[in-house]
Image: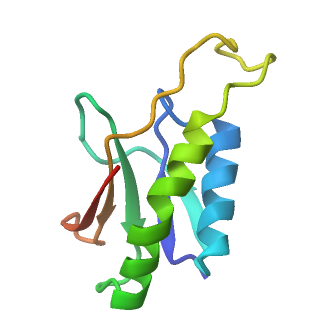
Amino acid sequence: MTQILVEENFRHIDGQDMEDLIAALAALGLVADPTQPRTPVHGHPWVMVLHWIQDELPPAVAERLTSTLPGTVREIFGRPRAADHPSGSDVPRVVPGRIEIHSPTGGVLRAIPM
């Protein structure tokens, strides 16, 4: 059963990035799926948004996400795009400025600086 959703951001997250993010969350013991954009978070630097499905974020899960996810995200977005990427391999990659974990009601449960 899905525990956390990764919000799509077509400007910054491509299909391979999404697969890598879902795999990284699985390595942390979480079942993740992508979800359509739904959060009006704009600006520079961009914000990667995750949605926790349950009402409360368990402290152990919050700690795993806070301690591990920033490094993994930096690694994913630090890799160059493939030569056959639709937007071209010369399009620069941008690491998010922070990761936000939202509750089912939309409030921010955790903001993780990068």
Q: Residue at x 70, y 17 (%)?
A: 86
Q: Residue at x 61, y 81 (%)?
A: 29
Q: Residue furthest left?
A: 107
Q: Is residue 58 visible?
A: no
Q: From the top left corner, tell me how far across and down residue 33 is, in percent.
A: 59, 62
Front in this rendered view, residue 35 or 76: 76
Front in this rendered view, residue 74 or 96: 74
Describe residue 79's horizontal placement relative to residue 63 as left or right: right
Describe residue 30's horizontal placement relative to residue 38 as left or right: right
Describe residue 20's horizontal placement relative to residue 63 as left or right: right
Quarter where residue 81 is shown: top right
Q: Is residue 101 visible?
A: yes
Q: Is residue 72 above or below residue 39?
A: below
Q: Residue at x 69, y 15 (%)?
A: 89
Q: From the top left corner, tell me how far across and down residue 19 is, in percent.
A: 69, 51
Q: From the top left corner, tell me how far across and down residue 44 is, in percent.
A: 25, 28
Q: Is residue 45 above or below residue 34?
A: above
Say how many tags the image has. Answer: 0
Quarter where residue 56 is shown: bottom left
The quarter of the picture where the N terminus appears is: bottom right
Q: From the top left corner, tell me how far across and down residue 97 is, in percent.
A: 32, 41
Quarter where residue 47 is shown: top left
Query: Colour scheme in the image?
Result: rainbow
